[in-house]
Every structure is written in C-alpha cells, then in structure tokens.
Image: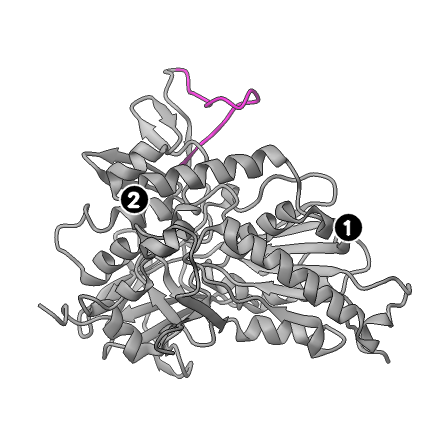
Amino acid sequence: MAKDVSHDAVVIVPGIMGSSLQDTATGRIVWGLRTGPLRKAWCRRDGMAVLQLSDDERQGRFGRIRATGLLSVPAWAPYLKGLEPYGDLVEAVHAVTADRAAVLEFAYDWRLPVAVNGALLAEAARRHLTDWRGHARSRAHPDEREARLVFVAHSMGGLVTRAALTHAPDLEPDTRAVVTLGTPFLGSVKAAVILNGNRGEALPVLPKRRMQALSATLPGVHDLLPGYRCVETGLDVERLDPAVVERIGGDRELAEQSQAFRDSQRSAGRPLPAHRALVGVAQPTVQSMSVENGVVRPQFHAFELNGDRELARDRHGIPVRKDRGGDGTVYRDAAHPGTGQGQSVAYVPLQHGALAKNSVALRHVRAVITEYEPELGPPMGDGEVGLDVPDCAAPHAAWWLRLTGVDNPSGIACSVHDAETDRRLMTPRLEWRDEEIGAWITLPEPVLYRVRVNTGANAPITQLVMGVETDEDD
C-alpha cells in the first residue's frame, strides 16, 4: 500500500512571537528562552528592552535581530498567555510530504511590519518551490502535475502569507492551498489591550508593564489591531483610529502606517487561493471595547450587522450585542476574511495557541496537504467547552479555573502539567461556585504550566499559565 503523502512544497509560517530571535552582535538568544530565563526576563526592569524596535529599525535598517527558527519550547507572554512550540505541527507536516526537503520552516522577525515579512516570505517561498521542483521526489504526482505550494500559517503567519501573495502575484497560480489557523484577518481587540498595558488594574504587574513598553514600539503588534467596528461610544460603535491608539498607549505613526497597509490589502481584494480557515470557537474572547480616560475596557461581546452592513439595533435603537466567542485571542468572525469560491471555514473548540498543536487541528492540516478534492473538512471534536484561566499566578496562591458551555462536570477531567516535560503535577477537582463550574488551583513554584481539560472527546483544551513571584526588582 502506498503511503498517503503529498508531493507539493509546504511552507510553515508561525504567528507573532513564534520564531526564536538572536541578537546578531552578541549571538545571544533574546526570544525562545526556556522557562527560567524567560520568567526572569519578564521580571527584570530591562529584560525585554533588547526586543524594542530601535530608531534605525524604524527607518528600515534591519539586521540587528535575526530569526533563527520556529519556537521549539513553550513560551509565555502577558495577555497572549501561552505560546506553544511548533514541533508537533512540523512533524505532522513531514509525515504527509514526500521528503523532508519539501518543507520550509519560515522563521521571521515578528517585531517588524507584516509588509516587510510578507516580502521576505514571497522570496523564500519562490526559492523553496524552485529548489523542490528540482528534487527527484517532487515529480511523482499521481496526476503528473508539477509541484505547487501549500502554506500552513498560524495566527499572524496568515497575515504574512496574504502579504506575500499580494506582494508577488506570480506566486498565486503556483499556490494550491493556504491553511490558516486562528489568523486575525480583521485584527484582535487583544492587541489594543496589550498596548494599553495594565492601566485598568489596581496594582502594577511588572511583566504587563514590560509587554506594553515593548509592544508600543513594534509595528507587528500594531498590524494586529482590530480593523472592524469595535469601539463602543454610547449608542454607536466606531472603528479604532490612530488618534485613539495613541491615547491608549500605542504609537500613532505606527498605527497610521498599519492602517494604510491594511487598507491597501483590502483594496487589492485578492482572496487567498483555496483558503482553508480553521477558527477557534467557544472560548471566552474579547470582541469589542470602550475607552474611558485612556483606559481600555475589554468587552466579551460583538455587534450584529444588518443586510446593509450597518449596525443592527433593537426597537429602542440600542445596538444588538452578541457573545460570538472565539479562540481566547481572536474573535471568531475576525478569523476569516469571508467565504467565496474555493474558500472554506471550519470551527473547533480550541484555544489560540493549541490551534497549531492539537491533534484535531493537525489532522485538518494533514488532510488539506494530501487532499484530492478542493473541499475537505477536518474530523471535528465534540463539545463546546470553554476554558478561562489567568495569564499568570503567584505560587502558593489559589485561583479559580472557570469552564464555560457546560452544566455538569461529569465526564470532564482537569489536570495541570509541567509545560516543558508535560509531566502531570495535579488533578484538581471540578466543582460548582456561584453558578459556575471550575476548580481551585494552587501552583507550587514559579515555572510555566499547561492546564488541560479533557471533555472525553478527541480534542482536549489546553492553555499555558506562568507562575510568577512578586516583582523581582521591587
């Protein structure tokens, strides 16, 4: 029996913070650190300063930082919570390609504008396809056609892929399919929350201050800002403009550049070839916001539109609000640019980071890579269980893990694991509290943990949580 593999060339494009970065002057790895050094970097006063964009870099003089590979260890960042490594995705792709040479792992400096990385991806993808077409094993297609490209892109990687295909239209006929996993095509309100820092919190949290200071310098973060109507102002809902971005803590110039780039992408109107969007659902997700005295108030609801693309209102003239959910980072309706000929959307109840790691998502990716017909969907998991955990927690202090979408804890198992070894450390008991189902969790030490909720289906829900002690420089 022949092995079910594809003879096409595959390009894996990670999301923001999904590539390890190195300081070219010192040779020091500055992103992609293991848990201990990573935690210390977030808690030191200058720990993330090396990643801030310099004046030279803002002028387009790059090279101070270079990407060395896809993220290979679990990472953590405030607001983004856990960032899972891409090893499982890479191996899943290798399992269904004719040769390891058919796969390109495109690491990139995620701090830079999506437009810059899109141009670099276009060049890398063309070289990769040319090299693979020269490989003997690329010419074994059952239909004897020439090898083409398949892009597999997680999160911001989907935006980079779209930018690459817009930058180099000649790539489009050579692209058989594009798979996106949780890509914020319409942006994410969480990017605005990050730029706002911890202004809305009573107590300062050092890692969040570091994340805000870093993000305010990064074009990559500004490229993730929401482009849909998401700012509630009384009885109206407006788009997030650069002036408001500056008021909440972002950079006005970067916001203006990002908006102009996104407008150009929209006006190009080029759908991704044979696009397969995998969208996370059923997780508590920030979908809109209000701004009060420069403080972002996240809101877990979106606003419905009518057939004229205007706000739907009830009989009192109040905008209709609905909790549409998402993957915990990207609101579900922002994770695909719409459906059309050759486009498809599949929904899975997974958190954002797990979309590039979970077995259901990986089966979907493998099915697209090996598909014969243009419309194949993934094997879907059962259930609509959502998981809500904090970014970080102090060791020895109890916190509440909340489940949504369930009314009975029967058949649901919760466990806490060491994120690096996946060794199970505890199995908390689920219980009722204030009409919610959840569990009290106490972390034993300041390391990175993975919380896993198994519903009995084939898609456990996972999320990373960092154990962080009191600010180390206080």
The residue type indicated by label 2 comes to Gly
Look at the image and give the residue range highlighted in magenta: 301-315
Which residue is most to the left? 474
Task: Identify the image quadrant of residue 316.
Answer: top left
Secondary structure under the numbered disc 2 in the rendered image = loop
| Residue 87 vertical placement versus 186 (above, below) | below
Q: Amino acid at mark 1?
A: Pro
Task: List the residue tagged with mark 1.
Answer: 173
Q: Main secondary structure of the magenta part?
A: loop
The earlier-in-sequence mark between 2 and 1 is 1
Q: Nearer the viewer, residue 220 or 211?
A: 220
Residue 155 can be seen, yes or no: no
Name the residue that disc number 2 marks.
250
Task: Kindly state the secondary structure of the residue where label 1 is placed.
Answer: helix
Relative to 266, residue 136 above or below: below
How far from the left and from the top, in percent, is residue 22?
40, 73
